[in-house]
Amino acid sequence: MIMSLALNPARRLLVPEATRASDVYERLREAIVTGQIRPNEPLIEADLAAELAVSRTPVRESLQRLFADGLIVARKRGWAVRAYGIDEIRENYELRAGLEGYAARLAAERASDGELTKIVAVHEKRLQLDQPTQEVRVKSNRQFHDLILAAAKNKRLADAVYRAGQFYFNLRVAGLTTEDEMRAANADHGRIAAALLARDGAAAEQATRQHIMHAFEIMYRVGEL
């Protein structure tokens, strides 16, 4: 199911149990958020432990955290990825728009010149990609947003964005996004980057909010809901 997420066997003996639990949680969460594990797909504790080459304890702890995050639900035999309804997804996107919009405003005010340079570089590199794979599209998109969030320099805000991020631009959406929609998303990124460079917090916030709601429109169109 998720063999690509398996931990390095050589590392297993060197990493404390608590760290392994955090590692397993991050890998499972990423697999769910990016769409590698689909809604309603079962998550069997023993199977996951075997695939990730860890004991069942860190897997059990990770599944409990994912349940607390609202990403999975309990089933008769183990767990399954939660399938959200349209109203829940819309509300989540509206929450993200507010949180990440404000993060962009803070980034415009607080980012160092070096941080802004990195943000712009990621955007420009994305524009230069020739027929990028779905994985590259997803990774470059998340990198752009993560750099802005880091530049906002507000850990509580970053944590809130992280918890709200159940519905990132994922692999399935990337595969069904049209070229026009990709160009529009890149244009959104360009407007955000320009506002950040101008240190215009209000413009950065507005552009980010619009961009996130555009992403919701794409998810709705492709039937990801």
Image (tube, helix red, strand yellow):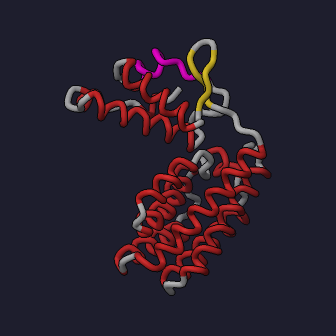
Provide residue 200's location: percent of width, then percent of height.
Answer: 54, 84
For the stretch drawn in magenta, the main secondary structure is: helix
Position above or below: 160 against 32: below
Side of 18 relative to 202 (left or right): left
Determine whether, in the image, residue 116 is placed left or right of residue 183. Answer: left
- Seen from the viewer's position, the closer of residues 117 and 207 is 207
Magenta segment includes 48: yes
Q: Residue visible at 71% across and 50% down?
A: 176
Residue that lies at the very extreme toward the left in this rendered image: 14
Q: Is residue 190 visible?
A: no
Q: Which residues are magenta?
A: 42-51
Can you say whether 220 is above or below 121 in the image?
A: above
Determine whether, in the image, residue 212 is placed left or right of residue 133. Answer: right
- On the image, the x and y values in percent for residue 104 come to 53, 71
- Please determine whether, in this image, residue 210 is positioned above or below residue 84: below
Residue 14 lies in the magenta-colored region: no
Expressed as whole percent of the image width and height from the top left, the position of residue 84 reads: 71, 38
Placement of the C terminus among the 4 image quadrants: top right
Of 200 and 13, nearer the camera is 200
- Residue at horizontal 56 percent and vertical 52 percent from the top: 133
Residue drawn at point x = 51 percent, y = 62 percent: 145
Q: How many marks?
A: 0
* Horizontal arrangement in the rendering, residue 93 relative to residue 119 (left or right): right
